[in-house]
Image (spheres, rainbow, N blue to C red):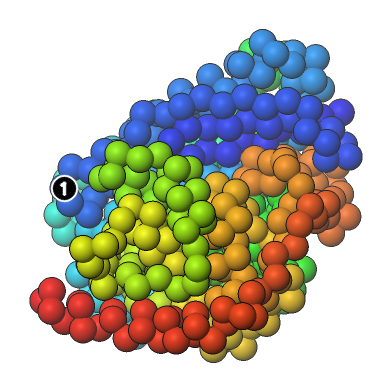
Amino acid sequence: MTYLGIDIGTSGVKALLIDAHGKALGEASAPAVEPVRPRPGWSEQNPADWWTATLAAIDALKQSHARELAAVRGIGLSGHMHGATLLGENDAVLRPCILWNDGRSAAECAEMEAAFPGLRTVSGNIAMPGFTAPKIAWVRKHEPDIYRQIRKVLLPKAYVRLLLTGEHVEEMSDAAGTLWLDVARRDWSDELLAVTGLTREHMPRLVEGSAPAAQLKPALAARWGMSDAVVVAGGAGDNAAAACGIGAIRPGEGFVSLGTSGVLFVSNEKFSPNTEGAVHAFCHAIPDTWHQMGVILSATDSLNWLSRITGRKQAELSGAAEAGFKGPGETIFLPYLSGERTPHNNAHARGSFVGLSQSTDAAQLAQAVMEGVAFAMRDCQRVLADAGTRIDRLLAVGGGSRSALWLKLLATNLDMEIALPEDGDFGGALGAARLGLCAAEGASPQAIMSMPPIKAAIAPDSALSAAYSDQYARFRALYHPIEEARQ
């Protein structure tokens, strides 16, 4: 028997087949039409693009791995979080999905917290523009005709599940990122929904991520050569799915992700919010488990930006920074190109270089960018500690983890060893496939979601610790003066 994980991203969809032992059997990807930015700070995407890419990815697996695909018993879904997919009558999409990195609803966040002073207590989180509920408040104010037609609000992967199964279902980790969930109780909150004028009727049914959610439509099963009884699991939001893929499901286990955004993730045995530090306190994708995240919006995306403006490839920039590295650089970079979540909760924050000189070159700018991201992750660690969280084991994932210098900067600034897994896919698609296995077979997540073999352990550089603590203090001191000067 085999199991299929589907990871829905904004840039495309990845489908991964595994066997009952978790071994990868085959994979395929398909691109999606890139999100659009109708105005500065906005980010939208057509939900039909996710479905087109999903069909293309699984059809490609049918071509390359027909026998293995035909043996699928369970499917799991992972997807980018927070997106507001608005459905009207007959599940018609009412407008492009407002994505996780859209910052238009800052005013609505303040209005929601004023309307319901208990919002942070119930949700465990600050109202942030990235979350789903403030987006609906924005639509109610600015697009009232659309708002009046809303019958269901789904997150991106739940929309794909709807087309796979015909049912409106969501799981706890993704639902926690809407700002409508009572995260401690793992249930929709009538009070939070009322702040945006919605009720439970507008919400999908809730399940745990490792539990069965629905069955694949017979027509799709026939298309891919499967049986008529394929279970679709609850699945997970992208970060919780990555944690399932890398085995970070026990208290104190975590990962640092250097992807487009940056994430410091740790599993918790109980609900542990820290709203003052803009920590994300969410349900995990498995029962009776929660997690916390510190999130920065521009990690490798900061290096992408530098690559665009210098005309040099990312690998070339990071390689030049590593070749010339001697310790903290003269230039400091604040990586707030798309605003920031943890710890500032400021959608209008912007990036800055400080300490430029005539001798500053592209390699030094690249080092400053990498250091700035490491300092931002250190900010995340600081506010997680303020919530009483201890991280016992940390693994590195994401494209940025291929840089030895970036890992060294992270280990030194976080003052803890970072484990680097052996080459392989430990992302959302694997986590989703593991959840599909659990749902189809009734298997224990603790038995299925082991950690991968480790090929290297990156230790902090004690010779640089004091210098980086001094530089981090300078980094922290810059945010408020620069933001005040921008007002």
Determine whether, in the image, residue 387 is placed left or right of residue 458. left
Nearer-the-camera pick, 257 or 244: 257
Q: Quadrant of the C terminus?
A: bottom left
Q: Which residue is mark 1?
A: 39
Nearer-the-camera pick, 223 or 409: 409
Give, as a three-letter code, the residue at label 1.
Arg
User: Residue 49: x percent and y percent?
Assistant: 40, 28
Residue drawn at the location 14% of the way across and 54% of the way down: 142
Mark 1 neighbour class, 10 Å CA radius: few under 14, some 14 to 19, many 20 or more: few
Residue drawn at the location 20% of the way across and 69% of the way down: 107
Determine whether, in the image, residue 96 is placed left or right of residue 202. left
Determine whether, in the image, residue 111 is placed left or right of residue 162. left
Instruction: Classify 482 as above or below 179.
Output: below
Instruction: Classify 475 as above or below 411.
Output: below
User: Residue 363: x percent and y percent?
Assistant: 39, 54
Residue drawn at the location 36% of the way across and 79% of the way down: 475
User: From where the camera sits, is residue 487 visible?
Assistant: yes
Q: Quadrant of the N terminus?
A: top right
Secondary structure of the residue carrying numbered label 1: loop
User: Residue 466: x percent and y percent?
Assistant: 54, 86
Nearer-the-camera pick, 486 or 149: 486
